Structures are given as C-alpha cells and as structure tokens.
Image (cartoon, helix red, strand yellow):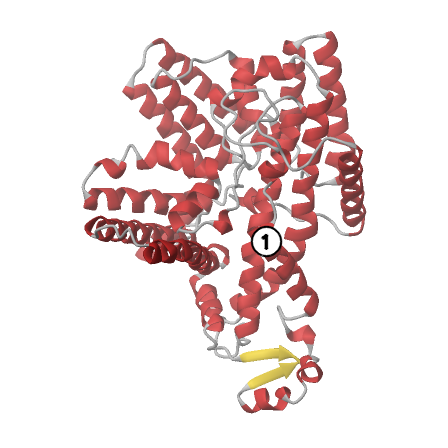
Amino acid sequence: MLFHALGFMLLFLPVVLAGHAWMARWRGVSASLAWLIGASLFFYGWWYPPHLLLLLFSVSVNFLLGERLARKPSQVVLWFGIGFNLVLIGLFKYADFAVLTLDALAGSAVVPPSLLLPLAISFFTFQQIAFLVDVHAGRIRPCGPMRYLFFVSFFPQLVAGPIVHHRQLVPQIDPGLGTVRARALALGLAVFVVGLVKKVMIADPLGAFADPMFAQALEANGGSGAPIGPGLIEAWGGTTAFTFQLYFDFSGYSDMAVGLAMMFGIRLPFNFDAPYRASGIVDFWRRWHMTLSAFLRDHLYVPLGGSRQAWPGWAAALMTTMVLGGLWHGAAWTFVAWGALHGLLLLIAHGWRHLVHRRRSSLRPVAGSGEARARRWSRPIAHVAGVALTFACVHLAWVLFRAESFAAALSVYGGMLGLNGVRLPEYYLDMLGSWGPILQARGVSFAPLRDFAFGGMEQIAITALAALLVFFAPTTQRLFGLAGDPCGSSSTTSAPGIVRPNFSWGLTTGVALAVVISTLLSDPPDVFIYFQF
C-alpha cells in the first residue's frame, strides 16, 4: 500500500483517523495505541502477509534483548542483538549478492537462495540496533511490549523512514495519542499534500524522463551490434532528471510520513534540509537523508574511532562508514562504488579545509578597507562556486547509484563526455535556423523525437522547474515553521512559518489534493525509489 495510492488516501487513512479519534475520546491512550498498532500491522502485511511474521519475530527478539540489557548491561548481549539484526538483514538482502560474488571469484555455479526482500527491513533493522545501543548505554529504558511494537511498526515511518530513535517517539505517545487536535490534523494534511505534490507531480514525470536514458545505456552494452549509448544531450538531461527525481521522490515520501504522523499527534524528524544547496560535500551529508547520516555517524563512524584518532585511522573509519552506507542502499557493487566515491570526496573536502585553515592562520590580518571589501565580495562568490561544485560532484556520483551495472554507468559517463556523439530532435532544425546546417557539419545529428531518451521541450521545462524549486523554494520545514529534531516533544510547531493557518491555506491544500487525485485516476502511481532499499 502506497501513501499516494487512492485506496490509502480515500479509504485506509480516513478509517484509521476516525478510529483513532473515537478511541482517543472514549477509550483513552491504550485503546488508541492498540488501534494504531493493528492498522500499522495491516498496512505492512498488505504487501506480503508472510513477512508480517518476520517483522513480529524481529520485534519480539529485540524487545526481549532490550529488557535483558535494561536489567543488566552486557556487551555479550548487546553484540548478540546487533549480530541477530545484521544476520537477519544479511540473509534476506545480501545472500544473493554474496553468492553471486563468490561464484564470480571462484567460478562455481552455486544457485543463490533468491529470498524475497522484506519491505522496510533496512529501516527497522537500523532502528532496533539503535534501540539496543541506547538501552545498553542507559539513555533509555524499555517501555512495555505494546509501546515498543508501536515504536517499530507505526505505519508513517515504517516503510522508508525517517529512522526514528526510541527516545524521540515513545515519549510522545501519551500526549500525542491522548487527544485529537484540529490544528495538528490540518497542519499534518498540508504537509502530507506538499509531499504528495513532490512525488506525483514532479518526481514521477522526472522518472519518466530519466528511466529511458538509463535503459538505453544498459542496452548499449550488449555486444558489437548493440544500440549506441546515450548522446551528450540525453546523458546530461537524463542524469539531471534523475538527480532531481531522487530528491523529490524521497523528500516527498518523508514529508508525507511527517504529515501523517502529525495527524496522530506524533512528530517525526525531517530527513532533508535543501541538500542541493550545500556548499560542500560535508555540508551535503548534513542535509541529505539526515536520520541515516546521524545513525551512521553515531553507530559506525564514532565507534570506529572517528576524528579522535590520527589521520590514517580517521580516514579508514570514514571510508568504512561510507562504503557500508553505500552497501546499505543496495546489494550491488555499484552502490559500494557510490559509497566509496562519496568517502573519497569527503576525504578531499576535509583535507582542503585543513589546508585552507592552516593558510589563513599563517597570514597576518590586514586592517585596510580595500581588503575588507574584497573579502565581503569573495564570500558570496565562493559560496556559489561551492554549491555548483558540490552539486556537480553529487550529480556525477548519482550515475553509479542509478545505473544497473558498471558497463551502463560507463556508457552514461561516456555520453556525458560526448563519446557517444551529439544528437538533437529533428524539430530543432527549424528552431536553430542557419545554425542547424553548421551544427550538422560539426558532427551533430538530428533524428525523430521518438528515438530520444531525453530532449523534448516538455522534459527540459519540467527539469528546469525542478531546478528552480530545489535551489530557491523554501523547504517544508521553513514553509510550515517546523524545525529541528522532535526529541520527544509533541509540539507541532516550533517557529513562525511562511504559511498561515487560514482559509486561503486550506483552499490551496484542497485544490492541490484534488489535482493530484485527478492525476492518479488517469495514471497509476509509481513506487517510491527508496522502497527497494
């Protein structure tokens, strides 16, 4: 069941909200809690009912281990719990990858188990590892089986995050589920609709532009008679479309999750903070998938020694964290390479920052007004250059993230370098006028639009609109005055937002929802990209 499926929006969600409101008013928190747990388990089991047993098994084992750690902290029990979770995700997510890799190295012919990947296993595994670590450290105490089951299975954050800590969610249960607030419902619906628009109206059309280009790159590596790979325009256009598609798809899902939880009086942390406006790769990872970045920092990078150790150890810890973070995203060597590439970029960024800091500290300050004026001008220029360079690096790295093989990735990179030629739709000949024959003489070819993965005016227009929104539009947090980590607070607002709760706000939300529903009536919804992780 998808958040943007009509069955979810028009049937499941209204029924669950109505049941929650009735339970909260007439039966109290315990009844509302039981109702939402039942709805969440139904939501999860809708995809593939047998995997519901796996989820309940994982929850039961981790809860019992947490109880044991709360009574008497033990490194042995903690490592057993971490190992249990890693074995579970390894069996279902990485068994085929490991067998195929060993087959390729050893030349054997072992048949992989081909187990069906359980939905959300990457997310609820990390969530429960963090729970065990927090209990062992004495930061939290288990709160009973029902509340723990709610913490793991609460349907807005179950499938693709954000990754929520026990100390963030559980303290909100009593104040959040005990009452139904009209303002929280209205605000949650508005945030949900923003995410819905991101997904249906922006991400899905961009995916329709990006997917054919990557499919063309994959087909281009089938042998000497295979089709040629994407050309210069197609490669840059398709990769740019995917760069924006991935952002709007996942940030749209995260907004929907936050909005849904808010309707039930629960605050979830935001996962994005305008990541493509980051002025450095370090800043990018503070803004992109923030709950995963925090988890990897706290539970992998810091335990490996982090920045407390000398350069070789610190670099090894950073690279290990990023490589394993890449592998978490998918069981393929392209994801490992993507993580390693980001690790290398982070090492370069930290090294550059260190050199710049040393150079600045060695220079004597100059008090002259001309020097001060030059520095004032140089700062915004340096910031814009940093944003452009960071976006270019992230953009190029996404090719490895999206390509289905290294050969396909190389085909895309070759197209971006112009090695596959330059092709344009033939209707551009009339638009270019006298420049058309000149370009043809320089090797540019023209062909019917149907032969192009990317190049139509509609594709260019939507991609340009996505770029404007990414770089200049306010974030959802800023729009509604929602900022920071909830940290157990049930408050729905934390700062003044751009949007004000009035008639115009409600009308805009209603019109946007109606437009999305009419779109979904004609086109079936696409799944979220991060569902496969």
Q: Residue at 41% across / 27% down in the picture? A: 129
Which quadrant, please, contains the N terminus? top right
Q: What amino acid type should be assigned to the residue bearing mark 1?
A: Gln
Q: Residue furthest front?
A: 369
Quarter of the image where one finds residue 500: top right
The answer to whether 504 is drawn above or below residue 154 in the figure is: below
Asked if one can make out residue 49 in the rendered structure from this viewpoint, the answer is: no
Asked if one can make out residue 149 in the rendered structure from this viewpoint, the answer is: yes
Q: Is residue 284 left or right of residue 360?
A: right
The answer to whether 56 is drawn above or below residue 92 in the figure is: above
Q: Position of residue 320 (x, y in %)?
A: 31, 44
Q: Residue at 51% across / 31% down in the picture? A: 484
Query: In this orientation, which residue lies closer to the viewer: 101 or 334?
Result: 334
Query: In this orientation, which residue lies closer to the viewer: 247 or 94?
Result: 247
The residue indicated by pointer 1 is: 245
Q: Position of residue 55 (x, y in %)?
A: 53, 27
Quarter of the image where one finds residue 12: top right
Q: Secondary structure at mark 1?
A: helix
Q: Residue at 68% across / 24% down in the picture? A: 184
Query: In this orientation, which residue lies closer to the viewer: 418 or 34?
Result: 418
Q: Position of residue 105 (x, y in %)?
A: 32, 56
